[in-house]
Amino acid sequence: MFEVDTIIHSGSLELDTSPKPYSYINIDYSVETDEYTNDSHSKIQITESLIDGISMTIQTHNNKLFTISPPKNGWELGRHEVKVMVQDDAGNTDFFETDFNVSSEPLFTINLKPGFNLISLPANPSNPDINSVVPLGHPVNLIMTYDPTNGGSWLVSERNPQTNQFEGGITQIDASKAYLLRTNSFESLQVDLRKIFLHDGNLPTTISLYKGWNFVPVINISDQYISTEGVLANEYFKSINPTSILGVNQSNNLSPIDRNSKLLYGKGYLVYLDDDDILVPPK
């Protein structure tokens, strides 16, 4: 039997959902497998690959399905152009050109009410600068947190009345602690959270806690789905032995948290320890 293999059937772009900043993009050339019965020239090799005119490495395990990994800081929002030159082992070549459109991830929303709100972030923000997390026009006007190291101290930042920018002891807001936010409005706070991946050298987040009171966040190490139902206090704190856990109730007063009650993402909690320890949040 003789084969005359003179073409490469063009590949196709495979997307599970609308691409987000950290989506993987697949190009499928498996159509080459069915080109002929017992086709011996079914493997494809990428000879050149460009995303928006920039050379990119495309990975494959079978020379049929090719995967484009997102950049470390994610794809920029909007349209991206893909140009790929491929060759099969019969020497045929094909130029594949397509595009994909990246839309933003949903922002994480924290509901606020007038007065002080004890809040936390379930993951680090894409930009931790305090004036990025709480933007210029937002009615939050004061942010506080507690540093339990070196005997303990309060850190405070307020808006400068001339510039409306936050100034003071807090310059960044992240997922390592909880914060008190003062506002005169019910306007919620919406934050763009950053995705982290193990293959980028990022280990799951842990939280260093110290003897005495700690402002503790509720973080989500899966980085995929943040449940509105929260996580059981007993499950979340199973790696440590807190003496006391306090939250803020509907009357805006501190109240004890039962071990069988839920800790809510977006909320912050006060935790007292008899000794220094490390909180390892569950997945």
Image (cartoon, helix red, strand yellow):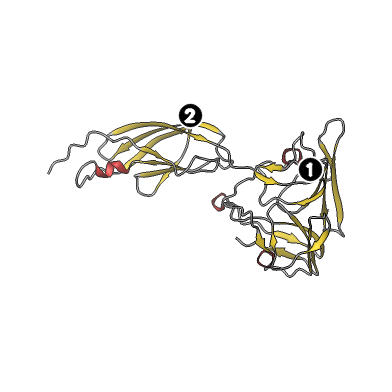
In the image, is 272 to the left or to the right of 8? right
Label drawn at residue 125 = none
Q: Quadrant of residue 152?
A: bottom right
Choose mark 1 or mark 2, whichever is in front: 1
Q: Quadrant of residue 235?
A: bottom right
Disc 2 target residue: 53
Q: Nearer the viewer, residue 209 or 222?
A: 222
Label drawn at residue 171 = 1
In the displayed structure, 40 sits above or below 82; it is below
Q: List x then y, in percent, for residue 108.
A: 65, 45
Circle 1: element type = loop
In the image, is 147 to the left or to the right of 191? right
Query: Mark 2, residues whose alpha carbon is within 10 Å: few (<14), some, or many (≥20)?
Result: few
Q: Are marks 1 and 2 in contact (CB under 8 Å)?
A: no
Q: Residue at x 64, y 42 (%)?
A: 107
Query: Mark 1, residues whose alpha carbon is within 10 Å: few (<14), some, or many (≥20)?
Result: some
| Residue type indicated by callout 1 | Thr
Q: Quadrant of the C terminus?
A: bottom right
Q: Residue at x 52, y 36 (%)?
A: 102
